[in-house]
Structure formats: C-alpha cells, structure tokens
Amino acid sequence: DQQVKQNSPSLSVQEGRISILNCDYTNSMFDYFLWYKKYPAEGPTFLISISSIKDKNEDGRFTVFLNKSAKHLSLHIVPSQPGDSAVYFCAASQGNKLVFGAGTILRVKS
Amino acid sequence: DAGVIQSPRHEVTEMGQEVTLRCKPISGHNSLFWYRQTMMRGLELLIYFNNNVPIDDSGMPEDRFSAKMPNASFSTLKIQPSEPRDSAVYFCASSLEELHEQYFGPGTRLTVT
C-alpha cells in the first residue's frame, strides 16, 4: 500500500515556464514533507521541506505548498531552467523515517 | 565538507557470493539509513541507526541481509548469500536525529549474476 503517491511519471515544461509537481499521501500521521531531486548516477539531493503546521514554504525559485485537508502537496519551480531536469521525489516523515513516492521525471526544454 | 561516502560505487558479483557495502556518514550526524532503489519498489528504507544502535530493521527483506554500525563514522550492509533479485542501487543517508532532512551518498549499484 503506497502511502506517498506521485501519480505523474513525467512532466515536460518549456524553459522559463512554471513546473508543478504533485504528491498525495494517505497517512495523516506524517508531520513533515520533503522534496528531493535526483540526477542519474547520483544520490537524491534535499531540495526543500515543509512542516505540517505550515501551508507554504519558499526558497528562491522553489515553493512547496501543503494542503492538509486534501493530503496533497506540490512543488512549484519558477522559472524552470534546463538544469532542473531530473527526477523529483516527494517524501513524508514519521519520526525519523522517510517514505518516498515513486518520483516524477521533469524535463525542461530550452 | 565531505558528504556521505559510499563504496564501492559499482559491484558485480555472482549468485551465492557475499557482498559488503560500506558507508561513511557526514561527520557529526547521529542517524544513518540504508535504502534500496529498484524499478519495481522505488526507494525503500531497509534499516536505520541512531547513535550507532539499530532502531528499525523492519525493511530488511530477509535474513540474508545484515547491517552493522561499529562506530559513528562507519556502517556496512552485508548480503550473504547474494541472489540476482538483490540487484539494485543501495543508498546510505545520514542526518541529525532531531532534523528530518537526510543527506544521501552517491549509491552503490549492485549487480548479481
């Protein structure tokens, strides 16, 4: 049973436009959410996070939104750049443990 | 500042052989995690340690898998005997126990033939 779901396997966006990556979760006990970016042959890299007591966190071009009632979070990247092309993983935290989604491949076209 | 270090980066072995994967966490981090990534199951947590003590090994697939952390700067994941279905990328990650953010190593790609 997948507790964290990323239903879009891939997303293609034009350079300069907004990229929106989505994530849904089922466990209401999750108290913290994170996004990771992964390039081929590298480990996942922490990108941005949000506590369950907030609904928005912004860091430069990256913004994460959390809708607790819908058990949904999203990552907005604006403007998108070709270097943002990677696999993006959503993760949810329960205590020390992270549960990861399956990932979304983002391709930013120049 | 060095990140999480894993060795080897690639390992090819024959079925039945013992495999040992190594990890050096970020200095000062007191939590260490072993993950496995496969196409079928994605990124799944195998085991994690706090202050060198195994806390949760419920993700370890079977008795063929074992992990140790003899000190704060070193951990091993051992598979004995290895099987073709163990082929995957194995990641080690570390964090400060009071924080949620985990920092990953580059992974070890294991192929068992």
Image (cartoon, coloured by chain):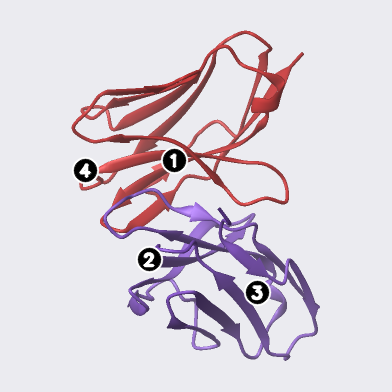
Chain colours: A red, B purple
Dots 2, 3 in contact, CB < 8 A:
no
Where is mark 4, residue-wise? Answer: A28
Task: Name the amino acid type tagged 3.
Answer: Asp
Question: Image quadrant of residue B10?
Answer: bottom right
Task: Name the amino acid type tagged 2.
Answer: Ser
Q: Is residue B102 left or right of residue B112?
A: left
Q: Is residue B102 above or below residue A13?
A: below
Q: Is residue A36 left or right of residue B96?
A: right
Question: Which type of secondary structure does the marked residue at label 3 adopt?
Answer: helix
**Chain that bears disc 4:** A
**Residue A62: horizontal and vertical position, in percent?**
47, 22
**Chain that bears disc 1:** A
**Chain that bears disc 3:** B
* Mark 2 or mark 3, whichever is nearer to me: 2
Query: How far is mark 3 from mark 1, CA to CA?
Result: 24 Å
Q: Is residue B47 above or below residue A38?
A: below
Task: Name the amino acid type tagged 1.
Answer: Lys
Question: Which type of secondary structure does the marked residue at label 4 adopt?
Answer: loop
Question: Which type of secondary structure does the marked residue at label 1 adopt?
Answer: strand
Neighbour class for label 3 at 10 Å: few (<14), some, many (≥20)?
Answer: some
